[in-house]
Image: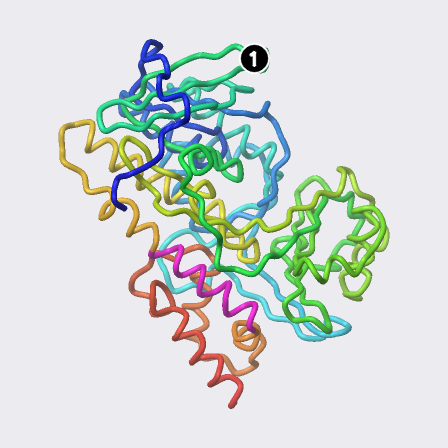
Amino acid sequence: MNGQTKSPANGSMNRQGRKVDVLVIGAGPAGAMVSAQLATRGYEVLVLEKQKFPRFSIGESLLANSLQFIEAAGMGEAVFARNFQFKNGAAFVRGRQGEEYAEYNFAEKSSAGPGFTFQVPRADFDQALANEAARQGAEVQYEIEITAVTPGDDEVLVESRDKAGALTPYRARFVLDASGFGRTLPRLLDLERPSDFPVRAALFTQVEDRIESGAFDRQKIRVSIHPEHSDVWYWLIPFSNGRCSVGVVATREFHQRFTGTTQERLFKIIGEETSLAKLLARATPVIPVGEIVGYAARVTCVHGPGFALLGNAAEFLDPVFSSGVTIAMQSAQLAAAALDRQFRGERVDWEESFARPLAYGVDTFRAFVNTWYDGSLQDIFFYDRQDPAVRRMICSVLAGYAWDTTNPYTGPHAYRRLKTLAEMCRRG
């Protein structure tokens, strides 16, 4: 990071306006949690959210590590009170009739920390976190769009527009972008760069599932693999209200083989995975089927003069291991700690205190995503003579403990070690 960014075209942005310590863009998990942690430290925090809450969002299956971040932000009681679906692990299914089955129970992980988490309708979950941020002292405003940002080491100028079109200027000591897929600062400051992942697409919805009790383990996310195309996979995420989130991820070319409405296309693809189609035989969609194409994203830098990017605003890998919310929460915790030190007069190296620690876990998940799609990780999951110690290490990453430096399957060496392990499994 060389500290150089582009300013908006209207470089004469009004320098008048309300001054705050921290302006947070977005009230999702990263925005809510960083706001709560900074507000409780005594800083004036303003959160500007483009959408009206509650609102739909994908990413409903949390990882166990996320509970540590939730508790650290003082939000544990609010989350537990929502009675979300208990989640204790992940199940993987392969074969024409789903005959190959592998499950990982988070309680069997090697890393310290919680061994369970929740499956959450994100509209309810995100609203709960945003409400807690407000209760802890952050000011949260909805239906406010950020239209311009001028970074600076001493002061960042921000301009917003409300739903009536009125423009409002702000002056912030620091700006944190937690806008998720909105990627506000990457767009405004020309920080985006192409992802090195192939272009993939997701079709998804929520259904009234009507699945017979005991037909599958509702305490685990179910990830199944297309019987003929190992890079095509499906998710089934059960909620506590009798509904499920269901979706399919494949290359754009695979999706284009199917015609009709988005709902027709989704259920045609589900029909090719017999065991999943059987589970969902009586399911009825309760929201319109959504589609996202080319969701993977990267940026040239995750911090700059007076700003930092949190969670998906910086980088999004792939939904296969439900890592998005956990990465967002980790970035929020790292940013809150670094910014608090900076505001108290300490000289903070954001590369050492924020970017590199965050990248360690992101690199871990990237290794797991890459080996999932090339088939290596699938061969590890379905190998029937797994070493118990290695299995616990793999389980730890699936539970979200991607920053555990004692685990050899984390960090920059994870990809090479996973490839070696997969080759050992293939050789029996």
Q: Horizontal and vertical percent for residue 313?
A: 45, 40
For label 1, the crowd category at 10 Å Cα-Cα, with few meaning under 14, some 14 to 19 and many 20 or more, is few
Q: Horizontal and vertical percent for residue 281?
A: 85, 55
Depth check, front residue: 326 or 293: 293
Residue 367 drawn in magenta: yes
In the picture, measured across the screen, residue 354 lies left or right of residue 313, that is left
Q: Is residue 292 above or below residue 196?
A: above
Residue 259 sits in which quadrant?
Answer: bottom right
Q: Horizontal and vertical percent for residue 163?
A: 58, 15
Amino acid type at mark 1: Gly
Residue visible at 37% across and 16% down? 13
Instruction: Magenta stretch: give its range.
Output: 360-374
Q: Horizontal and vertical percent for residue 275?
A: 77, 65
Residue most toward the bottom? 427
SS at badge 1: loop
Q: How many marks?
A: 1
Q: How is the image coloured?
A: rainbow
Residue 269 drawn in magenta: no
Q: Is residue 405 above or below residue 95?
A: above
Depth check, front residue: 258 or 249: 258
Residue 185 sits in which quadrant?
Answer: top left
Main SS type for the magenta part? helix
Residue visible at 68% across and 59% down? 234
In the picture, measured across the screen, residue 307 lies left or right of residue 312, that is left
Depth check, front residue: 422 or 136: 422
Depth check, front residue: 279 or 402: 402
Residue visible at 34% across and 45% down? 301
Q: Is residue 327 above or below residue 273?
A: above
Residue hosting label 1: 165
In the picture, measured across the screen, residue 134 lies left or right of residue 202, that is left
